[in-house]
Image: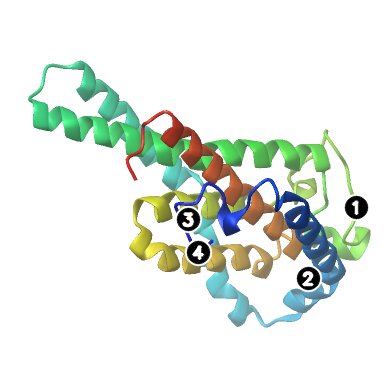
Amino acid sequence: MTKIYEKWPLGLTKSKLPLFLFVVIAIFACFFLIDLPITQLVASLDNSIRAPFKIITRAGNSDWILIPSLIGLIVGFILLKVKIILTTKLKAKQLFIISSYIFASVAIPGIVANLIKRLVGRARPMNVEELGAFSFDPIINGWTFQSFPSGDATTIFALFVALAFLMPKLKYLFLFGAILVGLSRIMVGVHFPSDVFGGILLGTFGAYAVRNYFIKKGWLDI
């Protein structure tokens, strides 16, 4: 994503869609080939190498994003309904719109990710020795069979995209943080590389879709 004001990342258009899908499928195929060896390599690493990623990975939890943004949109909504001076009302409207935008950008892809997780039912890496890298228990399953896509990668890349639109000068800093969190999901042993790639795609395109909707409605002035 180099031009954040384009409708879709990477300059994607209808004419480029077949090529894009081909490239995505090819990348998934490559990741599927390395899922097992990468997982085994990570498991063999010294704990001192993996320990920092156990802290970094917490940033992929959506609660710290959704709760403040939900509070922000509720407060903004309440302020808009009471009699306040014009300047304060404009700030309340901005608070409501930005909070709603961030909340929707993260929540909607996150919900989709959780639905896909349950439908696919892929076993997580901790089961790899017993079940291999491609074991599935679709629809009715528990946490250990909800590996694809990575929900945390979905969350953090959705947040990255949302914030990049609001603060484009910091987009590379946001991207670096998102990559670290995505990598941490592999390093702590709860996702395969292909799970993280799936989460990156879902979070990125989900956040773009939300952004496009908000702009279409005239709710975002960016």
Q: Position of residue 13 (x, y in %)?
A: 64, 49
Q: Amino acid at mark 1?
A: Ser
Could you say which disc has been placed on residue 2 in the image?
Answer: 4
> Camera-side residue: 160 or 130?
160
Residue depth check, mark 4 versus mark 2: number of the one nearer the observer:
4
Q: Secondary structure at mark 1?
A: loop
Q: Amino acid at mark 4?
A: Thr
Give the residue drawn at x 22%, y 22%: 80
| Disc 3 residue crowd, few under 14, some 14–19, many 20+, Cα 10 Å | many
Query: In the image, which is nearer the foreground, mark 1 or mark 3?
Result: 3
Q: CA distance from mark 3 to mark 4?
A: 13 Å
Residue, x 92% and y 58% (percent of image)? 131
- Say left or right for 24 vs 108: right
Q: Residue at x 81, y 67 (%)?
A: 35
Give the residue pinned by disc 2.
39
Q: Earlier in the sequence, mark 3 or mark 2?
A: 2
Q: Are marks 4 and 2 in contact (CB under 8 Å)?
A: no
Which residue is situated farthest in the left direction here? 85
Judging by the rendered image, the residue that carries numbered circle 3 is: 160
Callout 1–callout 3 Cβ contact below 8 Å = no
Q: Which numbered disc, 3 or 4, marks the residue closer to the eye? A: 4
Residue topped by disc 1? 135
- Of labels 1 and 3, earlier in sequence is 1
Circle 3 sits in a helix, a strand or a loop, which is it? Answer: helix
Whole-Å distance between the Cαs marked 4 and 2?
31 Å
The amino acid beneath tag 3 is: Phe
Among numbered discs 2 and 1, the one appearing first in the sequence: 2
Of residues 33 and 143, the one drawn nearer to the viewer in this rendering: 33
* Foreground tag (3 vs 2): 3
